[in-house]
Image: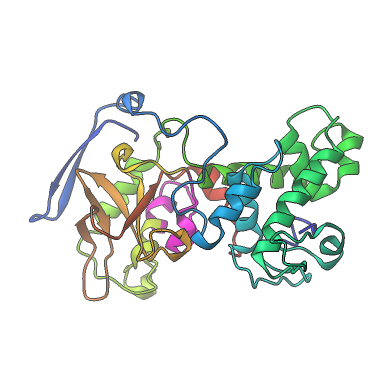
């Protein structure tokens, strides 16, 4: 923590008829935002709550508690920082000697590391110390720039990246591209860790992603497949979803558990065609997600299931259903490339 950003790294109202025997989906685009306007509201009120399983269960209580340390931060924002820094890996170490789940460099840890669990030591490799220290450091930075005009959270994040002096000098987020990008990335990623407080806006690119996946129905599965000519145009599950959204101009990460952070998370009742749907044997940890498909409506998805199968329709309501993501362009762009 404390090193530079460069170093640290549908449409809606679609009627869907699923004909499994014939292997095709019929999509009727009725209109944009018609159904979305009638969706039930999500969780609201109080401090931001973490989305289901977005933070590994081992760290969820720490993030929820320490994310409320001061008004400039919240649990979802703290989670976004930890994900950006290390992907929640307590053993992470960067080329610049940044260490642990919060990626503190030794000099910053020496000054700002705290004994979060009260066991008598300050261990940068122990999340019970490092996560509280990350929150404490954020709040310390926020206190340095508390008299600066503008958004306190954005000023804190800018201080994290460029230093409090620069924020004070420019009386807000300084005009550094790297710093402005860092502020935008973390505040965007925050949305993928927060339980939605209102309905989640529909995706305009969803129909195109479904159409791409529909064209691949019947294609044999290939582990590691991304659809290249050398692979015979075959896919695995996240290769298919990545290619489907790339066809409409959105670049997703390669693996399913990172694709989960490409946008906010509608509930099962709020699913719309084009949402990514995820599956895991551990329903408390998005980092353990092992499968993803594209929802098409009526309780079905298009997915590339496993070796020996073909791209097909499958039901989503299974015991290993984890949750869903409504992909956004900003959310995809904000995802780190090194996690």
Judging depth in this view, the residue of 60 and 228 nearest the camera is: 60
Q: Position of residue 115 (x, y in %)?
A: 76, 61
Seen as rendered, the residue at the extreme left is: 21
The quadrant in which the C terminus is found is bottom right
Please state if 231 lies on the left or on the right of 246 as rendered.
Answer: left
Q: Is residue 146 left or right of residue 304?
A: right
Q: Residue at image x 9%, y 54%?
A: 22
Q: How many marks?
A: 0
Q: Residue at position x 58%, y 47% from top? A: 189
Residue 66 image offset from top left, x and y in percent: 65, 49
Answer above or below: position of 103 versus 170.
Answer: below
Image quarter of residue 15: top left
Residue 204 shown in magenta: no
Residue 222 x %, y % = 32, 73
180 or 88, which is in the foreground? 88
Q: Quadrant of residue 75?
A: top right
- Residue nearest the viewer, comparing 182 with 74: 74
**Screen quadrant of the N terminus:** bottom right
Nearer the observer, 272 or 289: 289
Give yes or no for residue 257 being in the magenta stretch: yes
The stretch in magenta equals: 242-263
């Amino acid at each position: 923590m404390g090193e530079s950003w460069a170093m640290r790294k549908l449409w809606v109202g679609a009627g869907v008829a699923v004909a499994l025997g014939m292997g095709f989906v019929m999509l009727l685009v009725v209109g944009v935002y018609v159904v979305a306007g009638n969706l039930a509201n999500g969780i609201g009120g109080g401090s931001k709550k973490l989305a289901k399983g977005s933070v590994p269960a081992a760290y969820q209580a720490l993030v929820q508690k320490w994310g409320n340390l001061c008004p400039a931060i919240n649990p979802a924002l703290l989670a976004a920082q930890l994900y950006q820094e290390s992907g929640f890996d307590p053993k992470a170490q960067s080329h610049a000697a940044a260490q642990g789940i919060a990626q503190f460099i030794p000099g910053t840890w020496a000054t700002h590391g705290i004994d979060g669990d009260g066991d008598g030591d300050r261990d940068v490799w122990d999340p019970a110390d490092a996560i509280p220290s990350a929150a404490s450091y954020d709040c310390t930075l926020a206190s340095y720039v508390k008299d600066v005009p503008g958004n306190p959270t954005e000023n804190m994040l800018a201080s994290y990246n460029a230093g409090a002096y620069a924020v004070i000098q420019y009386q807000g987020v300084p005009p550094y591209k790297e710093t402005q990008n860092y502020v935008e990335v973390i505040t965007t990623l925050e949305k993928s860790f927060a339980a939605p407080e209102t309905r989640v806006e529909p995706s305009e690119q969803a129909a195109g992603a479904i159409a791409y996946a529909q064209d691949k129905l019947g294609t044999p599965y290939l582990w590691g497949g991304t659809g290249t000519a050398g692979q015979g145009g075959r896919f695995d599950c996240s290769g298919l979803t990545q290619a489907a959204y790339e066809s409409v101009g959105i670049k997703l990460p390669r693996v399913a558990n990172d694709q989960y952070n490409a946008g906010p998370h509608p509930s099962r009742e709020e699913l719309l065609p084009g949402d990514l749907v995820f599956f895991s044997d551990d329903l408390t940890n998005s980092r353990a997600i092992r499968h993803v498909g594209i929802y098409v409506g009526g309780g079905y998805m298009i997915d590339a299931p496993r070796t020996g199968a073909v791209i097909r329709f499958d039901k989503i309501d299974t015991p290993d259903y984890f949750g869903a993501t409504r992909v956004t362009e900003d959310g995809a762009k904000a995802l780190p490339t090194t996690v």
